Image (cartoon, helix red, strand yellow):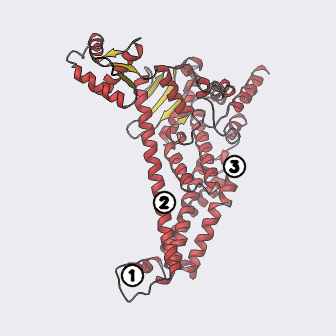
Amino acid sequence: MLLTSYFLAALAIVLAWPTPLALSKAKWTARAPVAAVLLWQAIALGGGLSMIGSMLVWGLTPLGNDLISALHAGWLLVTGDPSVNSPGVIHLFALSTAFLFAFHLVLTLVRASWRTTRQRAKHRQLLRLLSNPSQTRPNTLVLDHDLPVAYCVPGFNGSVTVLSRGLLTQLSAEEQRGVIAHESSHLDQRHDFLILAFTAWHEALPWLPTSRLSLEAVRQLIEMLADDKALEVVTRPVLLRAIVGVASSITPAKTSQDDAKGLAGEIVGMPGGEVTSRRLQRLLSPVAPLSGFQNFVVLSCTVLLLVCPTILLIAPRLLSW
Amino acid sequence: MASLGDLERSVMDLLWDSAEPLTANDLRDALAACGTDAKELAVTTVLTVLARLEKKGLVARERSTRPHRYTASSSREDHTVGLLNDALGTAQDREAVLARFIGGISAEEAVSLRAILDSVKTV
């Protein structure tokens, strides 16, 4: 038990700091966004699991040789069985921390999803008043504005894609197809869940700088995923021109940032200029996707990251053999 | 019978398009004139819709006159800008709400990208 808790703690530290740092700098992620997104999830899940697990296992050490018997002894202790020796204060502290931390993580996730749901509902409500359903496309709303804008509002009962009139008039039909394919892949692959999970992870651990790194990395990766889907429909130059067409409409707004009242001032700002250029780089100069073997290595790491802490939690004695 | 949501939309459209504040009676008449299924629409229904819209902050009520007169609290354009702001805003929590096509591309990048594409075209 003791050895297992140390191992889990070491794993937690490695997954909390050096691993996300290295992965956020790694170049190969642009070549295999799917595998990279999976790996990020495994790092976050495995990290949280081993963080909680190490404290739990360590706290239960005085009570038994494996998790099941220790939990059983813990239960006897709680119910007041006098035959069980009470663990020391430090161990009780570790146990409480483990439970509190797990509770904190779950609560943050619940809070974040509740907040998101409410904001989306508000946004949809205004959309109902302001937009018109597209004549030609299903689940698409057209917003009457000159700025070329495209986005989607995910939801359980029907996600919608919102296009502005400006987008429909200023982009060619081909470019529009690219934009829409990009947006619908966000909706189809439920990228909003991913972002929600990593946003909550960052909110739960704001003092951990890598939680911000992982959120940003995942944001980039889902854009790459969506670009790849769009490239199944349109060619690379078309998609690039669509991106320029949509993005440069925001450009003049950037310069009039002080004009807070005007439209320009209110629409300022695309976050993270330096971070996401990788999305553009891989569109401008395509790189070969990872080979089958490389993909296999990444996926194996992903599976190991999830399986290791889980197995050690269930059977901590594996390490003492 | 139109749903409350549809009625809300019609009422807002009327208020947005009207130069001056309207009473519930005005609105009922206008709805009856433009709608086909609005025949049996009662003033109380219009008042219910107005109350809902007021609660949402979309409609302002003038209480100095009888009957009360209603205006849209801000213009259609302002609301549209608000929506676009949601979609393009910098606020971190927005990221989870909406997914944008140009997610994470800065204005500077857009300029340089356009330059690159233009140079490719001219070659």
Q: Decide which of A25, B32 is in the foreground and name it.
A: B32
Q: Quadrant of the C terminus of chain A?
A: bottom right
State the CA–CA distance, disc 1 to disc 3: 51 Å
Is A206 located above or below residue A159 in the figure? below
Looking at this rendering, what residue extends furthest in the right direction? B123
The residue marked by circle 1 belongs to what chain?
A
Badge 3 or badge 2: first in the primary sequence: 3
Q: Position of residue A236 (x, y in %)?
A: 65, 30
Question: On the same chain: label 1 and label 3?
Answer: yes
Q: Position of residue A193 (x, y in %)?
A: 49, 46
Q: Nearer the viewer, mark 1 or mark 3?
A: 1
SS for callout 1: helix
SS for callout 3: helix
Is A19 located above or below residue A127 in the figure? below
Badge 1 or badge 3: first in the primary sequence: 3
Toward which corner of the image does residue A75 lie, by quadrant? Answer: bottom left
The residue marked by circle 3 belongs to what chain?
A
Q: Which residue is mark 2?
A: A104
Amino acid marked by disc 3: Trp
Q: Decide which of A212, A89 is in the foreground and name it.
A: A89
In the figure, is residue A122 to the left or right of B114?
A: left
In the figure, is residue A195 to the left or right of A253?
A: left
Q: Position of residue B71 (x, y in %)?
A: 38, 19
Mark seen at residue A68 = none
The residue marked by circle 2 belongs to what chain?
A
Q: Which residue is mark 3?
A: A28
